[in-house]
Amino acid sequence: MRKIVLTYGLIAGAILSAVMLIGVPFKDLIGFDRAAIVGYTSMVLAFLMIFFGVKSYRDNVAGGHLSFGRAVQVGLLIMVVATVCYVATWQFVYHQFLPDFAEEYAAYSLEQARAAGATEAEMAKRTKDLAEYSEMYQNPLVNIALTSLEPLPVGLVLTLVTAGVFGRPRRGGGAARHQAEAATARSNPKAGAG
């Protein structure tokens, strides 16, 4: 399992990292509005590797039979590897190229609120909240935690969908499938150990 998780996780992480690195020179052209679209589209594309990784595990390690739980486990591990790559790349980009990211985002957010007709009281509260966010974002642990949360929803959805596709109970009921998985694990000790 380890080889499949690392292979597909690193491919997904490479996609996420490449899109982020390619986007840095074009950040002003892309802007904050389109950056979210580009970012989440790249996450969907990258996390398609969860589908291919779980399929590879099912076909090459689990003998064609896979429980929902095992499919979720493989998918989540691929997601974790990709997310580590994503976070590491953001830390490099943030510290080397975008150290004023939080302040730029705060200015953008205030401009959006003003354009939407926010009152002076709402603007004052938003300014205070964004100043606190910018200060908090300077803490490396908070920065890493917040960055880790960005791909989480996309990765979880694709993991659950993939597990639903490959981990469905087959005809013959759960007991028959469980016996087949147990027999596969006995005949292929690497199936459970990775």
Image (cartoon, rainbow, N blue to C red):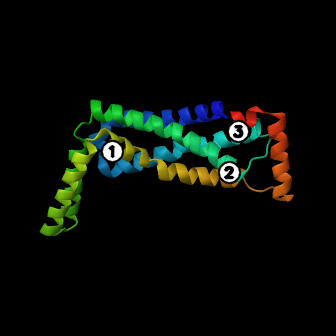
Q: Which residue occupies 71% across, 50% down?
A: 166
Q: Which residue occupies 70% across, 42% down?
A: 55
How crowded is the residue under tag 1: few (<14 C-alpha within 10 Å), some, or many (20+)?
few
Which-is-in-front pick, marks 3 and 1? 1
Estimate the spatial distance between the alpha carbons at disc 2 and disc 1, rounded to whole Å: 31 Å
What secondary structure is marked by label 3? helix
Q: In the rendered structure, which amino acid carries the disc numbered 3?
A: Tyr
User: Which percent across, then down, holds residue 56?
Assistant: 70, 38
Q: In the rendered structure, which amino acid carries the disc numbered 1?
A: Val
Mark 1 or mark 2, which is nearer the start of the sequence?
2
Q: From the image, tell me which residue sits under label 2.
A: 69
Q: Nearer the viewer, residue 60 or 133?
A: 133
Q: Which residue occupies 34% across, 31% down?
A: 92
User: Which percent across, then down, holds residue 25?
Assistant: 31, 34
Give the farthest residue toward the left: 120
Q: From the image, tell me which residue sits under label 1.
A: 142
How crowded is the residue under tag 2: few (<14 C-alpha within 10 Å), some, or many (20+)?
few
Estimate the spatial distance between the alpha carbons at disc 2 and disc 3, rounded to whole Å: 13 Å
Estimate the spatial distance between the alpha carbons at disc 3 and disc 1, rounded to whole Å: 34 Å
Q: How many marks?
A: 3
Question: Which label belongs to residue 57?
Answer: 3
Does the residue at mark 2 contact the one at mark 1 (Cβ under 8 Å)? no
User: Could one spot residue 105 in this view of the protein?
Assistant: no
Q: Nearer the viewer, residue 166 or 26?
A: 166
What secondary structure is marked by label 1? helix
User: Which percent across, then down, holds residue 53?
Assistant: 64, 39
Q: In the rendered structure, which amino acid carries the disc numbered 2?
A: Gly
Mark 3 or mark 2, which is nearer the start of the sequence?
3
Q: Nearer the viewer, residue 185 or 53?
A: 185
